[in-house]
Amino acid sequence: MELVSPGIGLIFWMTLAFGLVLWLLSKYAWKPIMKSLHEREASIDKALHEADKAREEMKHLIFSNEQLLNQAKEERDEILKKGREIKEKLIEDAKQKAGEEAARIVESAKESIQNEKMAAMVDLKNQIAQLSIEIAEKLLGHELSDPQKQKELVDKLIKEAKLN
């Protein structure tokens, strides 16, 4: 029955104990808790901002890679076009000369064109392979579904962004 109709003394001591606990919490606990919550919120905002920045840089890099690839294709086509032009000119010159001289010049031109073509193709293949690997690495990095791996990726990108 005492719980239903508590006495004045019990109310006084309970109020005093509650007030003391409330004062201790406000004095020693709430400020550090609120400070840590604000710090955590700031770090999350910063991480999100850095992730957005990294995403924008990734888009820029992909665009740059596409431009480089298109430029490499144009250069390859130009080299092949020049190679064909050289070949045709050498063939015409070779037809005008007699016998051995003509055969030797044509053979020399074919070897030169083949070497230039092979060098251009090897260089282009190397560039395309490097660009493909970089793009694949970055795309796969964004496809991670594990929250821990995502956090590690964000941390890594933040570090890379700070270094750059």
Image (tube, rainbow, N blue to C red):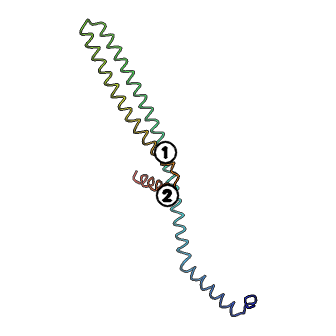
Q: Amino acid at mark 1?
A: Leu
Nearest the eye: 45 or 151: 151
SS at badge 1: helix
* Residue that label 1 marks: 139
Residue at 27% x, 10% y is: 102
Q: Residues within 10 Å of mark 2 (few under 14, many from 20)?
A: few
Residue kind at label 2, given as amino acid type = Gln
Q: Quadrant of residue 127?
A: top left
Q: Is residue 115 above or below residue 161?
A: above
Q: Residue furthest left?
A: 100
81 w.r.t. 152: above or below: above
**Relative to 62, does residue 22 appear above or below in the rendering?**
below
Mark 2, mark 1: which one is toward the viewer?
2
10 Å crowding of disc 1: few (<14), some (14-19), many (20+): few
Q: Is residue 10 left or right of residue 135?
A: right
Residue 75 rendering spot, x and y as whole percentages: 40, 28
Q: Position of residue 130 (x, y in %)?
A: 39, 39
- Nearer to me, 144 or 121: 144
Q: Residue at x 57, y 80 (%)?
A: 25
Instruction: Name the one closer to the observer, 10 or 97.
Output: 10
**What residue would you read off at disc 2?**
148
Residue drawn at x 52%, y 60% as measured from the top left: 44
The answer to whether residue 162 is left or right of residue 100 is: right
